Image (spheres, rainbow, N blue to C red):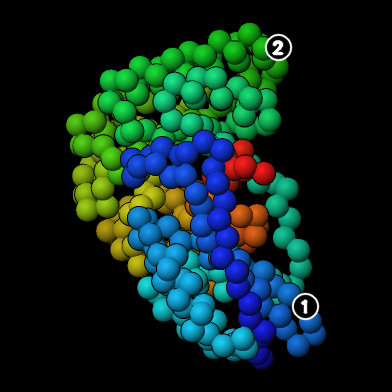
Amino acid sequence: MNYQFQFEPYQRSFKTPLKTAYGIWETRSGIILSLTDEQGRIGWGEIAPLSWFGSETLEDAIAFCQQLSSVISIETIFTIPDSLPACQFGFESAFMELNANADVDLSQLQYSGLLPTGETALTVWEPLFQQGYQTLKWKIGVDTITEEINLFKQLIDKITQTLETRFLEETRFLSGTSKIRLRLDANGGLTFEQAQRWLETCDLINADHKLIEVEFLEQPLSISQLELMLELSDRYSTPLALDESVANFQQLNSCYQQGWSDIFVIKPAIFGSPKILKNFCDTHQIDMVFSSVFETNIGQQSALKLASELLLYHRAVGFGINHWFIA
């Protein structure tokens, strides 16, 4: 079968520039594409590259789309090279939307809300919690480690005081069945010694607090330091998660084969072929967190459908990011 193909680049501005270990991010750019079948039905997809994470550049993706004809085949969709993982996701997502047997129920998914870096997190966490987020993510490795650990302890204290004051009578908190879970994401920006300090801090918090849990420390070291991350994983009780180290299928498979058994953070929009990811997960029972790359609602819906099919441990999906954008 052949499909009519169209595409259009887009840009979205952040309300406040996002500060990470990679620098300042002010604008999200990508491509919206559509496939139209012979019955006139339309499947939408999104190409949202993140080149510093290892995907193709936006320029590469645009060039690929430009060289395609306005009518493309199924073979074209499923033979996009691995060097274009965001394109693989975008085209396969549009194809799957056209060929889905039924709507996927996303209502059972829980979401993780992204906090701003630095001191602003001390005031932003509560509005997000009031909106229903019980999992919150905070970027670290941006300021000095002493400043960040002090801020983190202040955040823990503020959350604890609020929960004890407002929810003391709520049995779901008293029983420990419901907690605020915090995720720390270093984007590979820590040294081994800094990672040890963070994990020591996290272990103490997890031992001392009943209503708060540090769910995991995400990508503390660079992708070239898997052996050291395996060592940290064995040494501390707070789980570790790989993110940059498993940005695409080749990396995921390599880390799995080298013995990683903690958490894998999957960013579907830049990971590559959804079909290949599904096949891997059918064979290997891995603990995954699905995460956003600040794509639009089109890419989000495709990624969340994958998450609803593949999540084993019901971890919150990292798609609580829409509050970062200008409407």
Task: Look at 55% across and 56% down and name the residue there.
Answer: 11
In the rendered image, which residue does mark 2 sit on?
169
Dividing the image into 4 quarters, which one contains the N terminus? bottom right
Position of the C terminus, as image quadrant, is top right
Give whichever of 326, 54 is nearer the camera: 326
Q: Which mark is residue 278?
A: none
Residue 69 spot, x, y in % from top left = 57, 88
Q: Quadrant of residue 177?
A: top right
Return the x and y of residue 186 as percentages of the image width and height: 35, 38
Q: What residue sits right under mark 1 in the picture?
A: 41
Describe residue 285's horizontal placement relative to residue 170 as left or right. Answer: left
Q: Position of residue 81 (x, y in %)?
A: 41, 79
- For image coordinates 35% across by 42% down, the residue present is 23
Residue at the outermost right position: 39
Dot 2 crowding, Cα within 10 Å, few <14, some 14–19, many 20+: few
Residue sitting at 48 percent across and 55 percent down?
267
Q: Nearer the viewer, residue 302 or 180?
A: 302
Rendered location of residue 157, percent (x, y):
48, 13
Residue drawn at the location 63% of the way across and 77% of the way down: 6
Between marks 1 and 2 in the image, the one whose residue lies nearer the viewer: 1
